[in-house]
Amino acid sequence: MVKQAHLVALALAFLLLATLIVILHSGDSEDLRTHVLLDPEEVVRIEIQSTPAQTTPTDSSAQDEQAFVLQREGDKWFLAQSPSTKTAANGSDTWVANDHRVAPILKLLTLPQRQNYALAEIDQQELGLDPPRARVQINSLTFLFGDSTVDGNARYVLVDNVVYLYPEFVYPLIRAGKDAFINQ
């Protein structure tokens, strides 16, 4: 009889634990959905502009080389070029973009779960946001990139008057320039 009571109590405890896990898990999914700024499937245009590293006055093309546009048509991304650049192999002024390089840019749409700061709480110049190191516009959302954190694992990014600490994964790709996005 005592054994049976223990088994019933154990089964009840297991049922309560399973219910708690389901409730917590569904709450996490709901919480994650609220941190996505825009569905990546809705994105049709990405404009990337980064401040050139130290350029000399004789290097007039450096500024042009740091600004480019990615445009989606159907399920393909294309890199639109300025008239001053060479034409693609097919003779047009667009190249097919590498989806694996576009994907990290689209991950900016999911806000990081790390600490964030209201714009009024920070000194934009101290964090490298005034002027920003890079600017990414995804449809109508603008992301301004500042300096990296002291440990180098994150970067200050201003989005809708809030500064977030994004992982450092996307900034090197932005700085690599338009050639890094061409599907080879």
Image (cartoon, helix red, strand yellow):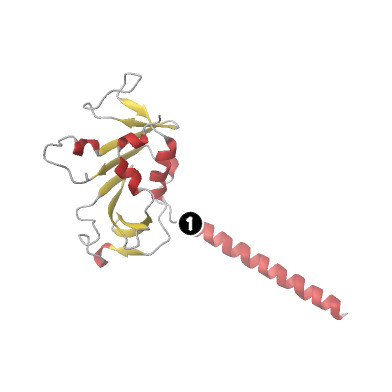
Residue at 31 percent across and 63 percent down: it is 150
How far from the left and from the top, in percent, is residue 174? 32, 44
> Whole-percent x and y of residue 87?
29, 23
Viewer-side residue, 59 vs 145: 59
Farthest residue to the left: give it: 57
Seen in the picture, residue 48 relative to 15 is either above or below; the reply is above
If the image is split into quadrants, where does the C terminus sit? top left
Amino acid type for the residue under numbered disc 1? Leu
Instruction: Give the residue number, with chain letter if any, for mark 1.
Output: 32
Residue lying at 31% horizontally and 21% vertically, measured from the top left:
92
Where is residue 180 drawn, in percent x and y? 35, 37
Report whether 115 appears left or right of 47: right
In this rendered view, identify the residue nearer to me: 48 or 118: 48
Q: Nearer the viewer, residue 59 or 105?
A: 59
Residue 57 in view (yes/no): yes
Which SS class for mark 1? Answer: helix
Q: Is residue 120 above or below residue 89?
A: below
